[in-house]
Amino acid sequence: MSFHLDYDHWIPLDAEDLAETGIGDAYESLLPELQKHAREPVPIQEVIDDDVPRYSVRAGAEEYVIYAPELDGQAGNGWDRATFALFDIINAQLAGSEYRFFAINGGNELGGMFLTPAQAQAARKTLSKKTDWPYLPEDKPPWYGQYH
């Protein structure tokens, strides 16, 4: 199966924006597309405490801490944790669908696409740079699921 990514369906996200209390806005902007694949998207709640400082996101029973004092020494991974949180929240809702929300690129160039696993696999065969391959973010440093 030959498959080329259709960048007209690429959804720009920017990991820095996500980490700077932007997950809620990004999630809201994704809802129309998510609703095509998930019956009833779950509401999310951002918990922001500028005094501590602490930022987390709740979706159902899950809480994703993006930055907080208890993550001392891991402050630089906020972009990665925010990326993982958003993609994990969306992909948990796609469990009954043939689609997953794959990350494309990372950092300020982060975006996402709804693809089937077969489409993502086929796209990897057409992209020469592994860092361009669609991936499912993981909460595992140092690459957080991105191919390298």
Image (cartoon, rainbow, N blue to C red):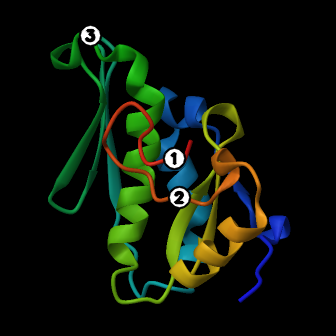
| Rendered-image quadrant of the C terminus | top right
Q: Residue at x 19, y 54 (%)?
A: 62
Of tags 2 and 3, which is closer to the observer? 2
**Marked residue nearer the N-terminal end (3 or 1):** 3
Label 2 crowd (10 A; few <14 / some 14-19 / many >=20) = many
Instruction: Check contact, mark 1 vs mark 2: CB within 8 A.
Output: yes
User: Which of the labelled discs sits on residue 146, or is there none?
Assistant: 1
> In the image shown, does 146 or 91 lie closer to the viewer?
146
Q: Where is residue 49 in the image (x, y as percent from the top left)?
A: 29, 22
Rendered position, 8 above or below 79: below
Q: Mark 3 points at which residue?
A: 73
Question: Image quadrant of residue 33?
Answer: bottom right
Amino acid type of the residue tagged 1 in the rendering: Gln
Looking at the rendered structure, the kind of residue marked 2 is Tyr
Please state which amino acid type lies under the numbered disc 3: Gly
Give coordinates of residue 8: x percent, y percent.
85, 68
What is the CA distance from the residue labelled 3 to the residue labelled 1? 22 Å
Q: Which one is nearer the viewer's eye here, 13 or 127?
A: 127
Picture quadrant where residue 87 is located: bottom left
Q: Name the residue under label 2.
A: 135
SS type, badge 1: loop
Residue at (82% x, 72% y) in the render: 6
* Left or right of residue 103: residue 2: right
Q: How many marks?
A: 3
Q: Position of residue 133 (x, y in %)?
A: 64, 57
Q: Earlier in the sequence, mark 2 or mark 3?
A: 3
Return the disc, 1 or 2, that comes first in the chain's sequence: 2
Please say if 102 is above or below 93. Answer: above
Q: Is residue 66 left or right of residue 131?
A: left
Relative placement, left or right, of 41 versus 3 is: left
